[in-house]
Amino acid sequence: MKDEQDTENEHHGDHSFPGWLHAGESPIQGFMKVFAWLVFFTIVEVMAILQEFSFEVTMVILFGIAAVKVWFIGSFFMHMIWDPPLVNRTAAVPVFFLIVLFLAVGLTSPGAVDDLRTICGF
């Protein structure tokens, strides 16, 4: 029993960053790099809004960047990159139900709108 706990503790203590993000630096520098990427993507989002793209192109850009930012935040700041795979699969269940409920309420309730543009408030 004690050997299993030691193995678990060794795995849990291994919070090293991937090589593309962290190369022998302290973990704080790894988190600062993630933060810098999040700031960069926020600036790209603002620039996408200021440009005069079509609505569809703007939404694809914004939702694409939002997905990347969610991955960064969940993986590093919420430490999900170091969790067992079962935890990540479990976290995907509420996301699935949020999408289903958003579409069900937004598109099928009485007096609902007919398009995504109106649901988003544009």
Image (cartoon, helix red, strand yellow):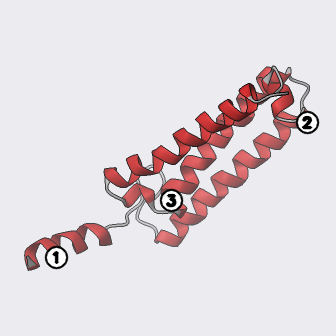
Secondary structure under the numbered disc 3 in the rendered image: helix
With respect to residue 116, does 23 lie above or below?
below
Q: Are dots 1 and 2 in contact, CB under 8 Å?
A: no
Identify which residue, 115 or 30, lies in the foreground.
Answer: 115
Residue at point 67% right, 31% down?
103
Find the distance from the CA under tag 1 to the CA under tag 3. Answer: 24 Å
Identify which residue, 36 or 107, lies in the foreground.
Answer: 107
Residue pointed to by mark 1: 6
Coordinates of residue 63 in the picture (x, y in percent) = 69, 35
Coordinates of residue 95 in the picture (x, y in percent) = 55, 44
Find the distance from the CA under tag 3 to the CA under tag 2. Answer: 29 Å
Q: Earlier in the sequence, mark 3 or mark 2?
A: 2
Q: Which quadrant holds residue 29?
A: bottom right
Find the distance from the CA under tag 1 to the CA under tag 2. Answer: 53 Å
Residue pointed to by mark 3: 76
Q: Quadrant of the N terminus?
A: bottom left
Residue at point 81% right, 32% down?
119
Q: Earlier in the sequence, mark 1 or mark 3?
A: 1
Identify which residue, 25 or 53, lies in the foreground.
Answer: 53
Q: In this image, 7 relative to 14: left or right? A: left
Q: Which quadrant holds residue 16?
A: bottom left
Q: In this image, 118 relative to 68: left or right? A: right
Name of the residue lying farthest toward the front? 110
In the image, what residue type sits under mark 1?
Answer: Asp
Secondary structure under the numbered disc 1 in the rendered image: helix
Q: In this image, 93 relative to 109: left or right? A: left
Q: Which of the two marks, 1 or 2, is nearer to us in this view?
A: 1
Residue at point 40% right, 50% down?
90
Residue 50: give its label.
2
Mark 2 is surrounded, within 10 Å at the Cα level, by few (under 14), some (14 to 19) or many (20 or more) other residues, namely: few
In the image, what residue type sits under mark 3?
Answer: Phe
